[in-house]
Image (tube, rainbow, N blue to C red):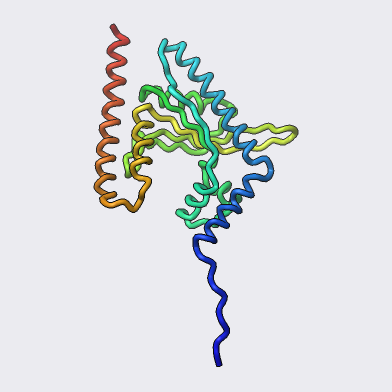
Amino acid sequence: MREPKKAEEKPAAVEEAQLIENIRKSMEKDQYYLLCQYAISIVEAKAKIIDEQLSMKYGREIMRSVSGRVKSPESIYAKLMRKELPADLETAGKKLNDLVGVRIVCLFLDDVYEIAEILKKQRDVTLVKEKDYIAKPKKNGYMSLHLIVDIPIYFGDNFQSKRVEIQIRTLAMDFWSVLEYQLMYKKNLSGAEKIGKELKNYSEEVANLDQKMMKLRNKIDKI
């Protein structure tokens, strides 16, 4: 007797696309994007005020740029898969700290830590976690100071806390990070390990450059 034909398994690519689409649809509900942008605008406003205060204090430029972003459905899915977690927005909200991000790029290394200290002292900013990838860079050479914070959001009669990852780095660190991403986006490229080692060496040069530029600035300030 011929065995009954088994139902064909759904191709992995189709299933992945469906899971990403489910995350996208969830993000379009309950004013998710609006609340995320609201949290970003609050942190950006804080950064602007800190920038003005420190610029007046030192008589020089402090921040080169401040930018925010909401993590895309594709990036959320990819990170959940790497962590072997269920691919849905509810899980992402509970397990991922970087769904909402703000990046502050400043000129000098000591500015990074002064900005961070001011942010941490603000009464409406709750520090959840601090990751110093400057003191201890990632294996690939990535450097930045990350503050995971909870920001209060008042929306109409409702209140909720929104988690934001604030990345603070120097212009040199940002330059390296942007180029590293562009050069290594082809994860299966030939010689990736060798290229990765070379990029890490350049990261160490960036760290040395930041130290030298800070010392040079201090020398000029004394003249």
Single out the residue that lies furthest toward the top. Answer: 223
Residue 117, percent across and down? 46, 26
Nearer to the camera, 161 or 71:
71
**Quadrant position of residue 164:** top right
Nearer to the camera, 88 or 116:
88
Residue 153, percent across and down? 65, 33
> Going 51% across and 24% down the picture, which residue do you hit?
47
> Going 46% across and 25% down the picture, which residue do you hit?
65
Q: Quadrant of the C terminus?
A: top left
Single out the residue that lies furthest toward the right. Answer: 157
Residue 96, percent across and down? 52, 46
Residue 71, percent across and down? 53, 42
Instruction: Name above or below for residue 15 compared with residue 62.
Output: below
**Quadrant position of residue 145:** top left
Q: From the viewer's perspective, tell me whether residue 55 is left or right of residue 28.
A: left
Q: Quadrant of the N terminus?
A: bottom right
> Number of callouts in the render?
0
> Going 36% across and 48% down the picture, which residue do you hit?
186
